[in-house]
Image: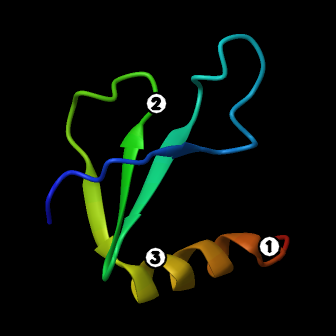
Amino acid sequence: MTTPDTWQKSSYSGGGQGDACVEIAHRHPHTAIRDSKAPTKATLTFPTAAFVTFVDALKQPTEEL
């Protein structure tokens, strides 16, 4: 995968400089994520379908132990 050109910051990036989160970029058929505090460091890439499944799982309510 080549380096994506367009990175989007989460709307949940927090206050201040808004750099306390991850950024995401889509480059079919993959999705890349990186640390917004260190954008020149390594990125992680996933097949888009797997990333969507991961995000959907994060949205599910957690069960109490």
* Residue 2, placed above or below residue 57: above
Question: Which badge, 2 or 1, is on the more N-terminal residue?
Answer: 2
Residue position marked by numbered label 1 in the rendering: 62
Q: Amino acid at mark 1?
A: Thr
- Residue at the image point whose x is 57% and y is 23% from the top: 19
Q: Residue furthest top?
A: 16
Camera-side residue: 34 or 4?
A: 4
Considering the image in quadrants, where does the N terminus appear?
Answer: bottom left
Dot 1 lies on which element? loop
Q: Amino acid at mark 3?
A: Phe
Number of the front mark, 2 or 1 = 2
Real-space CA distance between mark 2 and mark 1, rounded to the nearest whole angstrom: 27 Å
Give the x, y percent position of residue 27: 33, 69
* Residue 29, placed above or below residue 16: below
Considering the image in quadrants, where does the C terminus appear?
Answer: bottom right
Mark 1 is surrounded, within 10 Å at the Cα level, by few (under 14), some (14 to 19) or many (20 or more) other residues, namely few
Q: Which mark is residue 4?
A: none
Number of the front mark, 3 or 1 = 3
Question: Which badge, 2 or 3, is on the more N-terminal residue?
Answer: 2
Give the x, y percent position of residue 55: 60, 72
Residue position marked by numbered label 2 in the rendering: 36
Q: Amino acid at mark 2?
A: Ser
The colour scheme is rainbow
Mark 3 is surrounded, within 10 Å at the Cα level, by few (under 14), some (14 to 19) or many (20 or more) other residues, namely some
Real-space CA distance between mark 3 and mark 1, rounded to the nearest whole angstrom: 19 Å
